[in-house]
Amino acid sequence: MTTEAWPRVARLDAPRVLERIAEITGVRLILEGPAPGGEVGAAFVRWPDGRRSVLTAGRTRSGALADRAREAGVPTARHELTARVDGVRVIVQQRLPGAPPAIVDASLVRQMLRVNDQLAGVLSAAPDPRPAELYLTGDGPGFCLHDPMRGHSERTARLLDWVHEVGADGTHMVGDDLTHMDFHPGNVLVDAGRLSGVVDWDGAVRGDRHFDLVTLRFFLAGTAPALLPLVDDRLALVSARRRRAYWAHMSLRMVDWSIRHHDEATVDRWLTVAERGRAALSAAR
């Protein structure tokens, strides 16, 4: 079934957004061009005084969580301006040094593991009464949609059945850690071999930082499998129940998104990663 059969998330229309920001706030930012990476899009902009920033869409609350991460020693960007444009919250944030990594190597993964350690217990003094939802039995808000997987192919339907089976054992994530929720090499910046920024905190929640390691493992399995032992050493300490729930979420998220936004080769790549991870988890039980 083609991607046109399912709803897609609109990409950021930077020129339109900057015009609306000028109308709403009186601040006229200059568009420098698109920022690399990202599924929804981001853009480099310049303030009238010459400062350079990044325009994205996202949640205002994510700025406070990025601030908490920065207090814990993680390099994150400060929010400089927020506005609601045509029903969407847009953010202008500090531009950090560096760029997305051209090569993902063991040094980068080790630096990302250190970031994960820094987020342990960050939100323990400010508990959120609502546990984070993994959407294993119902649709997420624009992602983790179930119908595309049910209708795309027999393989994706079988994977969805497994996701539902896992979800019957619980669909929430609990914990005191600051959890990024999209922690992979495309959301870090590197400057001269040093991790100089962690970006895209839009989905961040209070939860279990090991979820971020499962996210990282999922991406490495599809792009740099030789590096998997670095992450697996950490995940060996996590219960099988939690690993299954987190892998089920990532399988749903990546395969659904690929069905709706990418080509069949991309669907097959992430579906294969999901299936192999599922098989490994089943064998370990």
Image (cartoon, grey):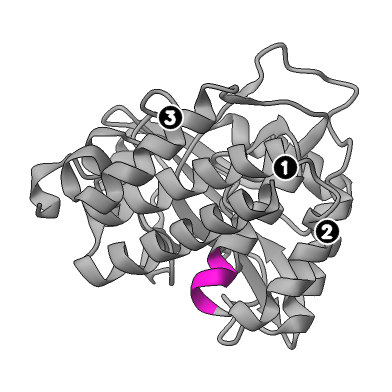
C-alpha separation, residue under disc 1 versus residue under disc 3: 17 Å
* Residue at image point 81% right, 49% down: 70
Identify residue for label 1.
240
Identify residue for label 3.
164
**Label 2 environment density (alpha carbons within 10 Å; few <14, some 14–19, many ≥20):** few
* Amino acid type of the residue that numbered disc 2 sits on in the rendered structure: Arg
* Residue at image point 21% right, 66% down: 264
Identify residue for label 2.
234
Q: Secondary structure at mark 3?
A: helix
The stretch in magenta equals: 219-223
Q: Quadrant of residue 20?
A: top left
Name the mark nearer the viewer: 2 or 3.
3
* Residue 22 visible in the snapshot: no
Q: Give the x, y percent position of residue 203.
A: 55, 39
Instruction: Say which mark, if any, is on residue 194.
Output: none
* Amino acid type of the residue that numbered disc 1 sits on in the rendered structure: Ala
Q: Give the x, y percent position of residue 121.
A: 89, 35
* Residue at image point 53% right, 56% down: 279
In primary-sequence order, the first of circles 1 and 2 is: 2
Q: Give the x, y percent position of residue 150.
A: 23, 38
